[in-house]
Image: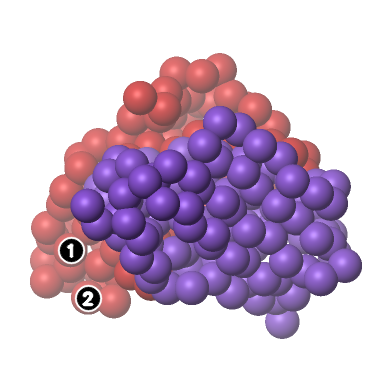
Amino acid sequence: ETGVTQTPRHLVMGMTNKKSLKCEQHLGHNAMYWYKQSAKKPLELMFVYNFKEQTENNSVPSRFSPECPNSSHLFLHLHTLQPEDSALYLCASSQDPGQGSEKLFFGSGTQLSVL
Amino acid sequence: GQNIDQPTEMTATEGAIVQINCTYQTSGFNGLFWYQQHAGEAPTFLSYNVLDGLEEKGRFSSFLSRSKGYSYLLLKELQMKDSASYLCAVVDSNYQLIWGAGTKLIIKP
C-alpha cells in the first residue's frame, strides 16, 4: 500500500467513449502527477499539479484533460482516444516538486485498452 | 538529447547475486533513483544516489559514478519475490526526472 489509490484498475473503451480515471492520495502531499507507461518504453510525464495548480503539460494531446479539485484528488478525463493511447496510466504524488531528492509515491495504475 | 540506458531483461538464479546497470547522458545531474515495479503494481522507491559511491540497504545496494555517467543496482541472496522490473531515473539540471525503459528481472529456482 503506497498511499496512492487509482480507479479503475482496468478500462476498455471505444474511440468514441468518454471516461475518467481517478487518483487519490492519503499522504498529505502537495504535488500530483500523471504518467503514461507503455511496454518497454520509459515513463512519460503527462501533467504535474502543485498545490492544485497545473505546472506542467508535456505536449499532451487535448483528448486527455486533467482536473485537480484539491491537493488529494486528481482526475484524467478521456475522450475520442486512439488505439495508440492504450497503456498503463500511473498517478504519483510527492511532498513538493522540483526538489532533486523528492521521491515519488505511485498508484498501481489503470490499464487502459482503446478499441 | 537525454538518454538513459539499461538492459531490457536479465535472468538470475535464486540465491545468487545480480547487477543491473544504468548509464546516462543528461543535461546536468541532480541525483539518480532506482524504483522496483512488480507486474501490475505500483513502482516503489528503492534508492537515491547523488554522491559517488556505494549505498547499502539490506540485500540491495546502489552505486554511482558521476564521472562515468553510470550506476548499478546490486541485489544479493536473490529471492523469487525479487522478480520485477527495475527502473532507473536521473534528475537533470532542471530537476526533471529522465526515466530509463526499465530492466525486467526474472528469477529462476
Q: Position of residue A72 (x, y in %)?
A: 48, 24
Chain seen in red: A
Badge number at residue A83: 2
**Residue at image point 36% right, 60% down:** B12
**Residue at image point 22% right, 75% down:** A83
**Residue at image point 46% right, 63% down:** B102
Q: Residue B77 is drawn in which quadrant? A: top left
The chain carrying label 1 is A
Kind of element beneath mark 2: helix
* Amino acid bearing label 1: Ser
Q: Residues within 10 Å of mark 2 (few under 14, many from 20)?
A: some
Left/right placement of residue B99 relative to residue B36 reads: right
Earlier residue among tags 2 and 1: 2
Q: Residue A86 is drawn in which quadrant? A: bottom left
**Residue at image point 48% right, 73% down:** B7
Q: Position of residue B11 (x, y in %)?
A: 34, 65
Residue B32 is at least partly visible in this image: yes
Residue A97 is at least partly visible in this image: no
- The quadrant of the picture occupied by the N terminus of chain B is bottom right
- Where is B26 relative to B54, above or below? below
Q: Position of residue A40 (x, y in %)?
A: 38, 72
Q: Colour of chain B?
A: purple
Residue matched to label 1 = A113
The chain carrying label 2 is A
Q: Do discs 2 and 1 share a chain?
A: yes
